[in-house]
Amino acid sequence: MASVEEKLTAENYPAAPEKATLEGKNKFIGFWLFLGGETVLFATLFATFLALRESNAGGATTQELFEIPLVFAATMLLLTSSLTSVYAMYHMKNFNFGKMQLWLIITVLLGLAFLILEIYEFNHYVHEFHFTITGSALGSSFYTLVGTHGLHVAFGLLWITTLIVRNAKRGLSLYNAPKYYVASLYWHFIDVVWVFIFTVVYLMGMVG
């Protein structure tokens, strides 16, 4: 098994650097345990929203609230960021640190654009429809579900940005490769959660 202290070159770089050390393998085990808890959390929030989505307390309905073009644009940004993170991991596996960092920076910018659109969306609902988290059970369940996802996106952006900055001068190693890879997997997870939100909350909400 490779050592995290070993100096890496193109010749001795392993095919799967994220799993080349015991520490790297342990990170994967911890990540999947963490992901199990996250899945339960979001499943609970989805179930709550579905149970309360008609409880609007006489306010705007989901058909009146949601603007699919805006949400679709945000969805495309997030899905594209998932693709750019795949490119980053491709370059990590090919020992190209510079291109990996570049694609991760693009991933962060796309994720940030998604968050900006989401904040704009929330602001629009509050000011145009007086749709707040305390106004109805629908508002509470919607903002809790979508807001929790937004917080996860913000955490993912902070995580990836920290990796980019901390390792900018260190280069790629068997110590930080698992950290990059796990962060990428986390990013894919929150992208998948958003696909469910887009389908269950917005598309089903438009249908009623």
Image (cartoon, rainbow, N blue to C red):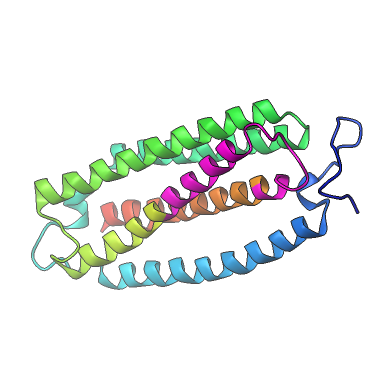
Q: Nearer the viewer, residue 156 or 9?
A: 9
Residue under the image location 37 percent in, 52 percent down: 150
Q: Position of residue 108 (x, y in %)?
A: 48, 37
Res. 67 visible in picture: no
Q: Is residue 157 left or right of residue 23?
A: left
Q: Is residue 100 left or right of residue 134?
A: right
Q: Nearer the viewer, residue 83 or 15?
A: 15
Total label count? 0
Q: Position of residue 174 (x, y in %)?
A: 78, 45
Q: Nearer the viewer, residue 14 or 49?
A: 14
Residue under the image location 55 percent in, 41 percent down: 82
- Quadrant of image for the C terminus: bottom left
Predominant SS along the magenta part: helix
Res. 34 visible in picture: yes
Q: Quadrant of residue 69?
A: top left
Q: Position of residue 54 (x, y in %)?
A: 21, 67
Q: Is residue 33 above or below residue 142?
A: below
Q: Position of residue 88 (x, y in %)?
A: 64, 34
- Quadrant of image for the N terminus: bottom right
Residue under the image location 58 percent in, 66 percent down: 34
Q: Nearer the viewer, residue 40 or 73?
A: 40
Q: Is residue 38 magenta?
A: no
Q: Is residue 107 left or right of residue 129?
A: right
Q: Is residue 177 magenta?
A: yes
- Tell me where the magenta segment starts and ends, as one range: 152-179
Q: Is residue 76 above or below residue 150?
A: above
Q: Quadrant of residue 48?
A: bottom left
